[in-house]
Image: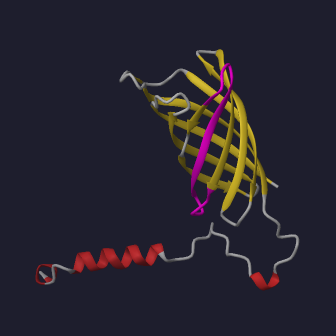
Amino acid sequence: MLVMRMPWLPVAAVVVLVLGTSTAVRADEVAPPDPSTATAAAAPLNYVTVAATTTLFAASNAGDTSGWGHDIGPVIGYGRYVTSTVALELDAGPSFVRGSYASFFLVPAAVWSFSTHVYAAARFLVQVDPEANFYLFPGIGGAYSFDKITLTLELNLSSNVGRGKPDLGVTLTPGIVYSF
Protein backbone atom coordinates (compact mmCIF):
# COMPACT_ATOMS: atom_id res chain seq x y z
CA MET A 1 0.00 0.00 0.00
CA LEU A 2 2.96 2.31 0.48
CA VAL A 3 3.60 2.31 -3.29
CA MET A 4 0.01 3.30 -4.05
CA ARG A 5 0.30 6.36 -1.78
CA MET A 6 3.63 7.37 -3.38
CA PRO A 7 3.36 6.57 -7.11
CA TRP A 8 6.64 8.40 -7.81
CA LEU A 9 8.64 5.93 -5.67
CA PRO A 10 9.35 3.35 -8.46
CA VAL A 11 10.35 6.15 -10.85
CA ALA A 12 12.66 7.69 -8.24
CA ALA A 13 14.25 4.30 -7.56
CA VAL A 14 14.95 3.75 -11.26
CA VAL A 15 16.43 7.26 -11.64
CA VAL A 16 18.73 6.71 -8.65
CA LEU A 17 19.89 3.33 -9.98
CA VAL A 18 20.55 4.64 -13.50
CA LEU A 19 22.37 7.77 -12.35
CA GLY A 20 24.35 5.82 -9.78
CA THR A 21 25.57 3.22 -12.25
CA SER A 22 26.21 5.62 -15.13
CA THR A 23 28.48 7.89 -13.10
CA ALA A 24 30.44 5.12 -11.40
CA VAL A 25 34.03 4.63 -12.57
CA ARG A 26 34.27 1.53 -14.71
CA ALA A 27 37.23 -0.80 -14.37
CA ASP A 28 37.89 -0.87 -18.12
CA GLU A 29 38.20 2.90 -18.50
CA VAL A 30 41.68 4.34 -18.35
CA ALA A 31 42.17 7.55 -16.40
CA PRO A 32 43.42 10.44 -18.55
CA PRO A 33 47.12 11.22 -18.12
CA ASP A 34 48.17 14.13 -15.94
CA PRO A 35 49.39 16.87 -18.34
CA SER A 36 51.98 18.05 -15.82
CA THR A 37 53.80 14.70 -16.08
CA ALA A 38 53.62 14.33 -19.88
CA THR A 39 56.86 13.39 -21.59
CA ALA A 40 58.03 12.90 -25.13
CA ALA A 41 57.26 9.17 -24.73
CA ALA A 42 53.52 10.01 -24.65
CA ALA A 43 53.38 10.38 -28.45
CA PRO A 44 50.15 9.52 -30.29
CA LEU A 45 49.53 5.83 -30.88
CA ASN A 46 50.07 4.19 -34.23
CA TYR A 47 48.04 1.17 -35.24
CA VAL A 48 47.52 -1.31 -38.03
CA THR A 49 44.18 -2.83 -38.86
CA VAL A 50 42.84 -5.80 -40.75
CA ALA A 51 39.14 -5.88 -41.60
CA ALA A 52 36.61 -7.34 -44.03
CA THR A 53 33.51 -5.54 -45.29
CA THR A 54 30.36 -7.13 -46.68
CA THR A 55 27.17 -5.54 -48.03
CA LEU A 56 24.03 -6.27 -46.01
CA PHE A 57 21.59 -4.21 -48.12
CA ALA A 58 21.81 -2.16 -51.31
CA ALA A 59 19.41 0.15 -53.14
CA SER A 60 20.45 1.33 -56.58
CA ASN A 61 19.65 4.78 -57.94
CA ALA A 62 17.14 3.08 -60.26
CA GLY A 63 15.12 1.94 -57.24
CA ASP A 64 16.12 -1.75 -57.24
CA THR A 65 16.95 -3.20 -53.84
CA SER A 66 18.87 -6.30 -52.84
CA GLY A 67 19.96 -8.05 -49.69
CA TRP A 68 23.37 -9.50 -48.96
CA GLY A 69 25.69 -8.70 -51.88
CA HIS A 70 27.69 -11.97 -51.77
CA ASP A 71 30.74 -9.74 -51.52
CA ILE A 72 33.74 -9.37 -49.28
CA GLY A 73 36.24 -6.55 -49.15
CA PRO A 74 39.31 -7.45 -47.09
CA VAL A 75 41.49 -4.45 -46.21
CA ILE A 76 44.69 -3.74 -44.38
CA GLY A 77 45.46 -0.29 -43.07
CA TYR A 78 47.58 2.04 -40.99
CA GLY A 79 46.35 4.72 -38.62
CA ARG A 80 47.77 7.31 -36.27
CA TYR A 81 46.09 9.19 -33.44
CA VAL A 82 46.63 12.91 -34.03
CA THR A 83 44.85 13.81 -30.77
CA SER A 84 43.82 11.65 -27.84
CA THR A 85 40.49 10.83 -29.56
CA VAL A 86 40.95 11.48 -33.31
CA ALA A 87 42.90 9.24 -35.67
CA LEU A 88 43.70 9.47 -39.36
CA GLU A 89 43.71 6.17 -41.20
CA LEU A 90 44.39 4.81 -44.68
CA ASP A 91 43.22 1.33 -45.68
CA ALA A 92 43.62 -0.50 -48.99
CA GLY A 93 42.22 -3.69 -50.38
CA PRO A 94 40.37 -5.54 -53.12
CA SER A 95 36.69 -6.35 -53.37
CA PHE A 96 35.38 -9.76 -54.42
CA VAL A 97 31.83 -10.60 -55.50
CA ARG A 98 30.88 -14.30 -55.45
CA GLY A 99 34.60 -15.13 -55.22
CA SER A 100 35.67 -13.15 -58.30
CA TYR A 101 37.78 -10.01 -58.23
CA ALA A 102 35.63 -6.89 -58.71
CA SER A 103 37.70 -3.81 -57.80
CA PHE A 104 40.44 -2.28 -55.68
CA PHE A 105 39.89 0.53 -53.15
CA LEU A 106 41.87 3.03 -51.11
CA VAL A 107 39.98 4.06 -47.97
CA PRO A 108 41.10 7.31 -46.28
CA ALA A 109 39.34 8.02 -42.99
CA ALA A 110 39.10 10.18 -39.90
CA VAL A 111 38.07 8.19 -36.82
CA TRP A 112 36.70 9.79 -33.67
CA SER A 113 36.74 7.65 -30.50
CA PHE A 114 34.10 9.47 -28.46
CA SER A 115 33.74 6.70 -25.88
CA THR A 116 35.77 3.83 -24.48
CA HIS A 117 33.87 1.37 -26.65
CA VAL A 118 32.18 3.45 -29.41
CA TYR A 119 33.62 5.42 -32.33
CA ALA A 120 32.45 7.23 -35.46
CA ALA A 121 34.30 7.09 -38.76
CA ALA A 122 34.22 9.44 -41.75
CA ARG A 123 35.43 7.07 -44.45
CA PHE A 124 35.67 7.54 -48.19
CA LEU A 125 36.05 4.70 -50.69
CA VAL A 126 38.26 5.67 -53.62
CA GLN A 127 37.92 3.01 -56.28
CA VAL A 128 41.10 2.89 -58.38
CA ASP A 129 40.49 -0.27 -60.43
CA PRO A 130 38.84 -1.09 -62.87
CA GLU A 131 37.72 2.56 -63.12
CA ALA A 132 38.05 5.58 -60.86
CA ASN A 133 35.04 6.23 -58.63
CA PHE A 134 34.22 7.77 -55.25
CA TYR A 135 31.94 6.63 -52.41
CA LEU A 136 30.90 8.20 -49.12
CA PHE A 137 31.27 5.55 -46.40
CA PRO A 138 30.47 6.95 -42.91
CA GLY A 139 30.14 4.51 -40.05
CA ILE A 140 29.69 3.91 -36.36
CA GLY A 141 31.44 1.12 -34.56
CA GLY A 142 32.02 -0.66 -31.33
CA ALA A 143 35.42 -1.65 -29.99
CA TYR A 144 36.69 -3.92 -27.25
CA SER A 145 40.37 -3.87 -26.30
CA PHE A 146 42.73 -6.47 -24.85
CA ASP A 147 45.96 -4.59 -24.09
CA LYS A 148 47.30 -3.72 -27.59
CA ILE A 149 44.67 -5.71 -29.54
CA THR A 150 41.22 -4.26 -30.27
CA LEU A 151 38.28 -6.05 -31.85
CA THR A 152 35.95 -3.80 -33.82
CA LEU A 153 32.56 -4.09 -35.48
CA GLU A 154 31.49 -1.19 -37.68
CA LEU A 155 28.19 -0.50 -39.45
CA ASN A 156 28.54 1.74 -42.51
CA LEU A 157 26.30 3.51 -44.97
CA SER A 158 27.70 3.69 -48.47
CA SER A 159 26.76 5.92 -51.36
CA ASN A 160 28.39 5.99 -54.78
CA VAL A 161 28.51 9.73 -55.47
CA GLY A 162 31.36 9.74 -58.00
CA ARG A 163 29.18 9.28 -61.08
CA GLY A 164 26.46 11.76 -60.09
CA LYS A 165 23.77 9.12 -59.48
CA PRO A 166 24.01 8.22 -55.76
CA ASP A 167 22.86 4.87 -54.48
CA LEU A 168 22.60 3.59 -50.89
CA GLY A 169 24.08 0.58 -49.18
CA VAL A 170 24.49 -0.76 -45.66
CA THR A 171 27.65 -2.71 -44.85
CA LEU A 172 29.13 -4.50 -41.86
CA THR A 173 32.87 -4.52 -41.13
CA PRO A 174 34.44 -6.68 -38.42
CA GLY A 175 38.11 -5.95 -37.78
CA ILE A 176 41.20 -6.38 -35.62
CA VAL A 177 43.46 -3.48 -34.62
CA TYR A 178 46.99 -3.74 -33.24
CA SER A 179 48.31 -0.60 -31.49
CA PHE A 180 52.00 0.22 -31.14
Q: Which quadrant holds the C terminus?
A: bottom right
Residue 152 image point, x, y percent: 62, 47
Instruction: Judge whether 163 appears above or below 151 on screen.
Output: above
Magenta part of the protein: which range? 112-133
Q: Give left or right: position of 114 versus 41.
A: left
The residue that appears at 53% across and 20% down in the rendered structure is 70
The residue that appears at 73% across and 35% down in the rendered structure is 92
How many marks the image carries: the answer is: 0
Q: Give left or right: position of 134 versus 80.
A: left
Residue 133 image point, x, y percent: 61, 28
Q: Is residue 6 magenta?
A: no
Q: Residue furthest front?
A: 164
For this rendering, which residue is in front, 137 or 19?
Answer: 137
Instruction: Judge whether 128 appears above or below 121 on screen.
Output: above
Q: Quadrant of residue 172?
A: top right
Q: Which quadrant holds the N terminus?
A: bottom left
Q: Report the magenta stretch's main SS.
A: strand
Residue 112 image point, x, y percent: 61, 58
The residue that appears at 57% across and 63% down in the rendered structure is 115
- Asked which colour scheme the image uses, the reply is secondary structure
Q: Quadrant of residue 127?
A: top right
Q: Is residue 121 magenta?
A: yes
The residue that appears at 46% across and 73% down in the rendered structure is 22
Instruction: Judge whether 85 appears above or below 66 on screen.
Output: below
